[in-house]
């Protein structure tokens, strides 16, 4: 089954999609997440695991407008400090979205590369009848019946 043009994503308070919704300018997906550079090695993984605040914005139809990404630290330098800093930063960014409402969204696939890491909603298929969309780096997988639910 092929993927729809826009992928529904269900808002789940207090879980992985708690900071998604709509604002005056369209839709948004925000998160605090960890990312590894695409060419990372498994040696000293703690210094390569980088935490960041991420805010993707979309127009009302779900087309990607822009992404704001800021790294806040590594696991090696203190994971709790890095995630706390990212949460504070993300809170500021979300507070700046006029008329923000947390709710379900539907967005088109997109890709952004930032400092050697992939961010976005990427279509993947092992065969033409098994298409899925993976949200990177959050590792949320969407698939038929395309109801907004995801696998981790």
Image (cartoon, grey):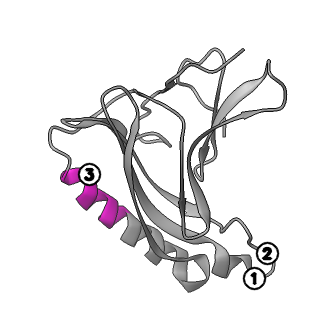
Residue at x 61% of width, y 68% of height:
116
Q: Quadrant of residue 127?
A: top right
- Judged by depth in the image, the label closer to the viewer, 1 or 2, is 2
| x, y percent for residue 94 | 26, 51
Q: CA distance from mark 1 to mark 2?
A: 8 Å
Q: Which residue is mark 2?
A: 41
Residue 94, numbered label: 3
- Tell which circle, 1 or 3, labels the residue nearer the N-terminal end: 1
User: Can residue 125 be found in the magenta stretch?
Assistant: no
Q: Quadrant of residue 79?
A: bottom right
Q: CA distance from mark 2 to mark 3?
A: 34 Å
Q: CA distance from mark 1 to mark 3?
A: 33 Å
| x, y percent for residue 86 | 40, 66
Q: Which residues are magenta?
A: 87-96
At mark 1, the secondary structure is loop
65 relative position to 126: left or right: left
Q: Residues within 10 Å of mark 1 (few under 14, many from 20)?
A: few
At mark 3, the secondary structure is helix
User: Can residue 88 be found in the magenta stretch?
Assistant: yes
Q: Which residue is mark 1?
A: 44
Q: Quadrant of the C terminus?
A: top right
| x, y percent for residue 121 | 56, 40
Please state which of residues 35 and 65 is positioned toward the viewer in this rendering: 65
Marks 1 and 2 close (CB-CB < 8 Å):
yes
Q: Residues within 10 Å of mark 2 (few under 14, many from 20)?
A: few
| x, y percent for residue 80 | 49, 73
């Amino acid at each position: 089954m092929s993927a729809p043009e826009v992928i529904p994503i269900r808002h789940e308070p207090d879980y992985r999609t708690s900071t998604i919704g709509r604002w005056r300018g369209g839709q948004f997906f925000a998160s605090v997440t960890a990312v590894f550079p695409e060419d990372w090695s498994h040696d000293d993984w703690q210094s390569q695991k980088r935490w960041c605040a991420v805010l993707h914005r979309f127009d009302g139809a779900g087309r990607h407008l822009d992404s704001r990404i800021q790294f806040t630290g590594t696991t090696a330098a203190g994971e709790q400090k890095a995630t706390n800093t990212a949460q504070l930063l993300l809170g500021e960014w979300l507070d700046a979205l006029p008329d923000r409402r947390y709710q379900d969204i539907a967005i088109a696939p997109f890709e952004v590369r930032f400092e050697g890491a992939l961010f976005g909603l990427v279509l993947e298929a092992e065969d033409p009848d098994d298409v899925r969309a993976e949200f990177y780096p959050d590792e949320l997988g969407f698939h038929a019946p395309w109801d907004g639910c995801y696998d981790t």
